[in-house]
Image: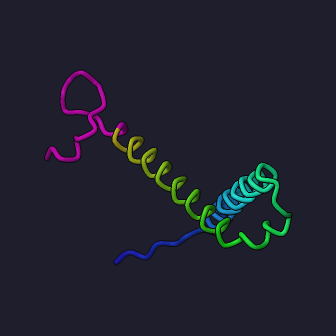
């Protein structure tokens, strides 16, 4: 098996992305606190919900990136036809 290496740059980028998701989740919680006129201690007592929301947002972001990279790789393949148009399913065709 081939070993893969996750670079420090990639780890840093993923941690920053997760931090941004956590900040967005906290801002949503802060908005809900002011909209429903509850006490500020809800910032700390609902921290578990904020973490779950942050992980959910991070998961959605991962799915969006995965779809983007799949489309990008699909359009990178050239079709066997002489049209020059990209073929999304050219990896199924044997040369």
> In the figure, is residue 95 to the left or right of 73?
left
| Residue 83 shown in magenta | yes
Residue 94 position within the rendered picture, expressed as x and y whole percent measured from the top left: 13, 47
Instruction: Name the residue rendered at 75%, 73% in the picture.
Output: 45
Tell me residue 88's x, y (percent): 28, 38
Indicate how the structure is coloured in the image: rainbow
Q: Nearer the viewer, residue 16 or 25?
A: 25
Quadrant that contains the N terminus: bottom left
Note whether 75 is above or below 30 in the view shown. Answer: above
Q: Nearer the viewer, residue 93 or 55?
A: 55
Q: Quadrant of residue 95?
A: top left
Instruction: Say how many tags the image has.
Output: 0
Q: Main secondary structure of the magenta part?
A: loop
What's the magenta region?
Answer: 75-95
Up/down of 48 relative to 61, above or below: below
Residue 79 coordinates in the image, percent (x, y): 24, 33
- Residue at coordinates 29% horizontally, 35% vertically from top-left? 78
Give coordinates of residue 9: x percent, y percent. 66, 63
Q: Is residue 9 above or below residue 4?
A: above
Q: Is residue 89 left or right of residue 63?
A: left
- Name which residue lies at 28% across and 24% down: 84
Relative height, residue 54 to residue 87 (above, below): below
In the foreground, 38 or 64: 38
């Amino acid at each position: 098996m081939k070993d893969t290496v996750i670079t420090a740059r990639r780890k840093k980028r993923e941690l920053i992305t997760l931090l941004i998701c956590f900040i967005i989740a906290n801002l949503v919680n802060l908005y809900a606190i002011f909209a429903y006129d509850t006490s500020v201690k809800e910032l700390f007592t609902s921290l578990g919900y904020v973490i779950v929301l942050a992980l959910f947002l991070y998961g959605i972001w991962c799915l969006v990136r995965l779809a983007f990279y799949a489309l990008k790789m699909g359009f990178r393949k050239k079709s066997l036809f002489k049209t020059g148009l990209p073929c999304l399913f050219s990896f199924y065709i044997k040369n």
